Image (cartoon, helix red, strand yellow):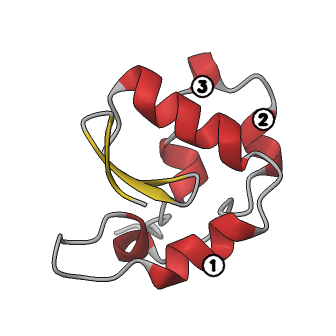
Amino acid sequence: MTNTAVQELTLADLLPISDSKDYWQHAACKGDPNHDAWFPYPSQDFDYARTICAGCPIRRECGDFASRTGQSGVWGGHEYDRGNLIRD
């Protein structure tokens, strides 16, 4: 019987490789294990994610990516639903 550890993915691991352009290597959220903070329910605040995004050097590119590719969740300090900005 082999004991294999399950590796927990981070938000940056979930980003598509085809659109990386090395931007994601600089993302402030890279390595953040708090997945729920990046995909809040409409009734939840997203202050944690917004705080991380505030100092991110690729914040604008991240939001553009979300809008362009139909992402949901917190991207670039804003919340999106299928690429549409729903909360600032």
Looking at the image, is mark 1 or mark 3 earlier in the sequence?
Answer: 3
Residue occupying the point 83% across, 49% down: 26
Q: From the viewer's perspective, is 66 left or right of 42?
A: right
Residue at numbered disc 1 = 51
Looking at the image, is mark 3 or mark 2 earlier in the sequence?
Answer: 3
Residue at numbered disc 3 = 17
- SS at circle 3: helix
Estimate the x, y position of residue 41 in percent, counting from the top left: 19, 72
- SS at circle 2: helix
- Can you see residue 3? no
Up the image or down, 42 lies above or below 48; here it is above
Q: Nearer the viewer, mark 3 or mark 2?
A: 2
Estimate the x, y position of residue 36 in percent, counting from the top left: 34, 74
Residue at numbered disc 2 = 23
Name the mark on residue 19.
none
Q: Quadrant of residue 39?
A: bottom left
Up the image or down, 36 lies above or below 83; here it is below
Q: Amino acid at mark 3?
A: Ile
- Can you see residue 71? yes
The N terminus lies in quadrant: bottom left
